[in-house]
Amino acid sequence: MSNYFIRPPESKEEWKNYFIFRWELLRKPLGMSKESLEDDLEDSSYHLMGIDDENNVIASGRVHFNNNNQAQIRYMAVKDSYKRKGIGSEIVTKLEDYASSKGAKKMVLNARENALIFYLSLGYSEKGPYLSDTGIPHSKMEKDLT
């Protein structure tokens, strides 16, 4: 397996590749347009990407604040060939640490059904269904950061 690094996108090219990766893994398979990829919280969010030793994006994740005490993870994705290697867990932990350092006491997210076990293994609890703009079933999940 290649080495990988997790860090925020830095250059204009990295931002472009990061957003394309998110779309290709999360939206394109659902027939959604590239325009559906970004929201109005991008500039105020903290973004992380996993990159391999050839500078290819292999993972993504973002956190934003819903209020002073609650942060939300969105756009988590890991390239299939890199799943189950700890990359997703590392990104979630880094997003939690960032949010906690900025005052968040609780983390929330909306998980696709195929990711429930992953988030449960990281200490999240399922709180009920969530109606996503993707049209596929999600569950509301949360975790205390204190």
Image: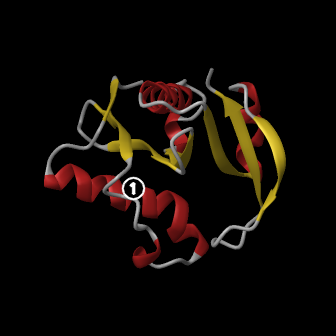
Q: Nearer the viewer, residue 140 or 53?
A: 140
- Along the horizontal axis of the image, is 13 left or right of 129? left
Q: Nearer the viewer, residue 29 or 94?
A: 94
Task: Give how far across and how far down residue 59 sits, in percent.
Answer: 44, 42
Please name the residue shown 45% across and 27% down the image.
Answer: 94
Seen in the picture, residue 93 relative to 66 is either above or below; the reply is above
Q: Nearer the viewer, residue 25 or 65?
A: 65
Number of numbered tags placed on the structure image:
1
Task: Give how far across and how far down residue 9 sits, in percent.
Answer: 25, 43
Seen in the picture, residue 106 relative to 141 is either above or below; the reply is above
Please name the residue shown 22% across and 49% down the image.
Answer: 14
* Location of the C terminus (image quadrant): top right
Task: Give how far across and how far down residue 141 sits, in percent.
Answer: 74, 43
Dividing the picture into quadrants, the one containing residue 83 is top right
Seen in the picture, residue 108 relative to 146 is either above or below; the reply is below
Q: Residue furthest front?
A: 68
For label 1, the SS is helix
* Location of the N terminus (image quadrant): top left
Amino acid type at mark 1: Phe
For label 1, the residue is 21
Seen in the picture, residue 145 relative to 59 is either above or below; the reply is above
Please name the residue shown 53% across and 48% down the image.
Answer: 67
